[in-house]
Image (cartoon, grey):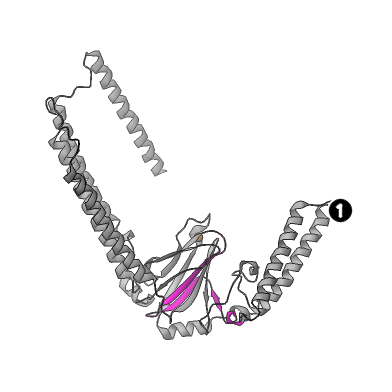
Amino acid sequence: MASFLIFLVIVLGIAAIVQVIRVFEISNFLQGEDGISVSPRETNSLRISLVLFVAGFFAFFIYLWVAYKQYFLPESASEHGAAIDTLLNFNFLIITIVFVITHILLAYFSYRYANTVSPKATFVTHNNKLELIWTSAPAVVLAIIIIYGLTTWNSAMLDTPDDSINIELYARQFDWTARYAGEDNVLGKSNYLMISATNPLGIINETKLKERLSEMDAEAAELEASRAEVYPGGKTDMEILDKIALKKKQKGRLEQMYAQGENEDYSVADDDILTKVEFHIPVGKPVNFQIRSQDVIHSAFMPHFRAQMNAVPGMITNFYFTPIITTDEMRKKVGDPNFNYLLLCNKICGTAHYNMQMNIIVESEADYQKWLSEQKKFFVAGTN
Ligand SMILES: [Cu+2]
């Protein structure tokens, strides 16, 4: 309500100013003045107001910087975080320098070259030296930013260490699931055709695969039965027939995959562990996140660790980092006993996008192992 009133006041204020200007113009017209020529006094007050405006603009910029500092990125808690922060600050510095210089020039030129008596512009058609400067200076600065940025990105992204812990982050509308690879540190394979009510990530293991194949038969049979219900008297329903055909085709593909992978060891999936709500990682050890999505593009964003990677349906993306500050240490640092590191979705992926959040607990290796040993393996959890 308050914001609506403010909005109303602003709109009415603008309308009032427009009306006053019109009255002023009409009265000028009636007095025989054209209202276009500007007196030296008016010029002077205009150029002073412009300088004041730019000064106010700078003051506002500094105010925003101070007032909203708390919403900047939180303290970094990963090994590569400091490098990312330096890169970001370097970019901010360049942007700020250019911003300040251009606005000072804007105010200066407006003030210095304000309309005095009969001004005449200098007619310059070409200036090699000037053109060289304004082309090469930004080019050099941009090249520095790009090369510096690429080097930082490469050193953070390339060469995932072999001893990384493999964890999958699985996104779907609207939640995350973290999957641990278990003792073998190998994540079981997955396929979207395997996705069912009891296997939301579509993980493949021997039993689950056979189960899914017969499930698909049952689903096709169910569709077949619904045909008779919807259209008694043997009429055909193209839509349902299409669904049945698709189901059979999918089953064929799954069977083919099974046949091709006969020598494949599907048992690596047997010890996989799934968690929701929160997941744990040990401090000082590289963690390699393999990121998947079930439906639309999501984005795995872990701001404290300076990590962000898109979750794209149909492919696996990855991001690895080494956490360096445990959750307990960070709680003391920020003076908040309820503080938690977060995994967020950073793509507006639908109506309940805000729901896509998980807590990340960084703890000692021993605590991590203890927590992990308490988690149930997905395929022996009873229901699966
Ligand atoms: Cu999302």
Residue tagged by mark 1?
A: 234
- Crowdedness near tag 1: few (<14), some (14–19) or many (≥20) residues, C-alpha within 10 Å: few
- The answer to which of 243 and 363 lies nearer the viewer is 243
Q: Would residue 345 appear left or right of 98 to someone viewing this image?
A: right
- The answer to which of 212 and 156 lies nearer the viewer is 156
Q: Is residue 310 above or below residue 324?
A: above
Which amino acid, mark 1? Answer: Gly
Q: Quadrant of residue 199?
A: bottom right
Q: Would residue 286 appear left or right of 201 to someone viewing this image?
A: left
Q: Which x, y percent locates residue 17? A: 30, 29
Q: Which x, y percent locates residue 188? A: 57, 77
Q: Which x, y percent locates residue 90? A: 25, 61
The residue under the point 12% across, 36% down is 112
Q: Is residue 74 visible?
A: no
Q: Quadrant of residue 344?
A: bottom left
Q: Which x, y percent locates residue 185? A: 50, 82
Range covered by the magenta-colored residues: 267-296
Question: How many marks do you count on the picture?
Answer: 1
The residue under the point 37% across, 68% down is 304
The residue under the point 20% across, 49% down is 100
Q: Is residue 318 above or below residue 224?
A: below
